Amino acid sequence: MSPEQSLQFHIPPEFTQKHHDALMTYLIDSRSLTTAVWRHLFQGIDLLDAAQVSTPTVTQSFRQVYGELIERPFANQYIQQLLETKNVMAESPALSANFARQIRPILQEAGFWKREMPSSILLQGYCLYWWQSFSRGYTFELFIMRDLLAGGIEFQMHDIRQPAERYSPADLIVLDLLGDIKTSIYFLQEPSANNLPNDFYITRLYEKGRERTLVVFQKPDAWDLIDGGATEPGTLETILELLPTPIEIEQRGIMLVVVEYETWKQMVRQKQSGEGS
């Protein structure tokens, strides 16, 4: 039986060469991606959710393969090692890479990867993308959690050691406000952004050639609760130009106030201590 007969891939026809090229660029050097290429990458990954791989005995979606063969065995091990770090941002890349190196051998052992089949690279790239998203996401969560503790902020946080809690709608609660921690602003641009369920979002903005800037996007009621003042109108594209001034933007019909993370922490701390009353 030829490789083509024993292993088959079903890639959605909407997955174009631009999506393919964006994924390959990401695998080679994610730091070189432009905004447009990132957009194609996100679109391509969404399309590959529905891609399938078939052997003579099983057919699974790419999403199922990642969930069963990669995330399920890796997640708890990685998070436990992450919790044992002293400097999570510095130590996590090596930890994540140790797991990432196991992805191709795991796919090969399962019969889902053959060197002579180009679509195998798409499956491997898909799994690498989601693993890196997972590992970076929880690295950033742990960094924020430790920073809030060090800054004297009172908060409740879901237990990232528990799989069920990792899928909770909110990552943390501050001043009875529901918050989420995001590694990028893609959550504001994807289709589900029409319904932002939480009160605030801690994330980071990136512009090529600059350090990432930590910011908080919050709904107007959350801003008012911490005694926020006047804002200046802006857009996603002008936030970095306007900071540190508090900025009000409208995104998909939702009003949001954006401030630097350090400013938000100071305002929350004052509210919790009663200084701003």
Image: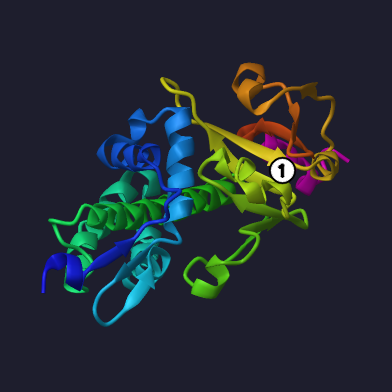
Q: Report the residue that reaches farthest toward the bottom.
A: 57
Q: Which of 145 and 45 is in front in this view?
A: 45
Residue 40 in percent (x, y) is at 45, 38
Residue at 43% x, 47% y: name it.
Answer: 44
- Residue at x 64% of width, y 20% of height: 238
Does residue 249 appear left or right of residue 139 in this picture?
Answer: right
Q: In which quarter of the image is the C terminus?
A: top right
The secondary structure type at the circle numbered 1 is: helix
Q: Which residues fall within the magenta stretch?
A: 264-277
- Check if residue 263 falls in the magenta segment: no
| Position in image of residue 79 (x %, y %) | 39, 63
Write down the quadrant of residue 232 in the picture: top right
Q: In this view, does 73 lie above or below 42?
A: below
Magenta segment main secondary structure? helix
Q: Residues within 10 Å of mark 1 (few under 14, many from 20)?
A: some
- Quadrant of residue 154 within the rendered picture: bottom right
Q: What residue type is labelled 1?
A: Arg
The residue at which mark 1 appears reads as: 269
Whether residue 272 is in magenta: the answer is: yes
- Residue 139, can we see it? no
* Camera-nearest residue between 106 and 46: 46
What is the quadrant of residue 214 in the picture?
top right
Q: Which residue lies furthest to the top in this view?
A: 241
Q: How many marks?
A: 1
Residue at image coords 77%, 53%: 175
Query: In this image, 252 relative to 140: left or right?
Result: right
Residue 164: where, in percent of width, then height? 55, 74
Tell me the quadrant of the picture where the N terminus can be found: bottom left
Residue 135 relative to residue 257: left or right: left
In percent of the image, x 47 and y 48: which residue is there?
140
Position of 47 relative to 60 (above/below)? above
The spot of residue 176 in percent (x, y) is 78, 57
